[in-house]
Amino acid sequence: MRQDFLLLAGRIIWLREDGIKSPFKREDWATTTILSIIRNPKYCGDAIMGKTYKPDVVSAKRLKNDGVIRDLFYIPDCVPQIIPKEIFNLAKAEDERRSNLRSASKTGSGRFSNKFVFSGMLTCASCGSKLRRWANGYQEGVKKTYYWICINKQTFRECKEKPVDETWIEKAFVKVLNSLIGSGGDFIATLRENIKAEIGDSILQEIEAIDEQIAGLQAEVLKHSKDNRGGLISNTEYDDLIAENEQQQITLTLEKNAKILKSEGMRLKEYRLDEIERILIEAVQGDLFDPQIFKELVETATMTREKITFTFKCGIELSYDFKEARVVA
């Protein structure tokens, strides 16, 4: 199970410590190698056919197919499975989550970053922009004080929020963590019930209902084709019916994929909940900020000068009021 979590979390250092070599027999793992594994469905036994195509019969060059010019075909269970589908789907959900986390450069965009503990994880609650680290105190012999400032404030001066001292954020997390530890597992138990309810039979039934609708539309295509060949409908009518049918199938497929992604996301939260519960059981209340525990527990945080709200990876949201110096559920 540890190797499975390894793949899910992308902890390259664990692969090195366990002596697991890369596909190229190297001891050092590259980030791109990890991404190529969690984004390749062949590892879970599936395959995507038609990823490249020839523009014409005489061309020697193959072009990348994005699914617009030519159809892509997803074929399940066609190659030997290396990774269980459940673990592969959890890794995919984690990849989707990280794609929405960006470093806070002055432009407001960037790649997923782990340069600092809070990199890419803090958002301004007032304007929705990311926060970036800023140092105050450049004189020789003067100790630097680090703040987190909204990039919309720093660059465009359009946000009213003032910078927040980094130590405030650390102390706020310590207080929130202590409240979770002191709750005796009540938060975890409540959340576990909520997750089980949300990934119950209803969403699976909704997916099955969409599959039935798609099957019905595919049957209509065959009927339209038969009617066209029999002269019951003209070529123009046939083209219009097929175009409308295709659009309906695309809409239903997008709806189905969204529900599948939601289900996988909830299962990822359930998976993380076990890890968080383990961490809380082992942790003790204290006054010191632990960067590793923060990274393992927190997904994002929204902040103003008055309050910060931590969103934990399992779905729990807890706030800390800087002025009142207390945790707010």
Image: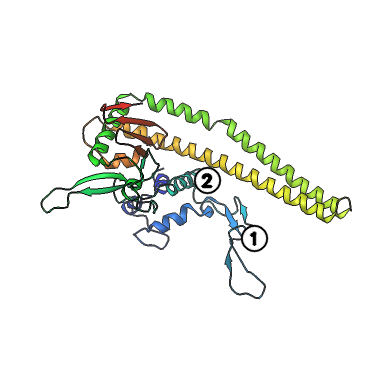
Q: Is residue 299 visible?
A: no
Q: Secondary structure at mark 1?
A: loop
**Camera-side residue of 165 and 268:** 165
Q: Secondary structure at mark 2?
A: helix
Q: Is residue 52 left or right of residue 312?
A: right
Q: Residue at x 32, y 28 (%)?
A: 180
Quadrant for the N terminus, please.
Answer: top left
Q: Is residue 186 left or right of residue 265?
A: left
Q: Residue furthest right?
A: 231
Crowding at mark 2 (Cα within 10 Å: few <14, some 14-19, many 20+): some
Q: Earlier in the sequence, mark 1 or mark 2?
A: 1
Number of the front mark, 1 or 2: 1
- Percent coordinates x, y for residue 57 in the rendering: 67, 73
Residue that carries the numbered disc 1 in the rendered image: 70
- Percent coordinates x, y for residue 165 in the rendering: 24, 40
Q: Is residue 235 left or right of residue 99?
A: right
Amino acid at circle 1? Arg
- Percent coordinates x, y for residue 166 in the rendering: 25, 41
Q: Residue at x 38, y 36 (%)?
A: 312
- How many angstroms separate mark 1 from mark 2 (CA)? 27 Å
Amino acid at circle 2? Lys
Q: Is residue 296 above or below residue 42?
A: above
Residue that carries the numbered disc 2 in the rendered image: 85
The image quarter containing residue 125 is top left
Crowding at mark 1 (Cα within 10 Å: few <14, some 14-19, many 20+): few
In the rendered structure, are the residues bearing label 1 and label 2 in contact, judged by CB atoms less than 8 Å apart?
A: no
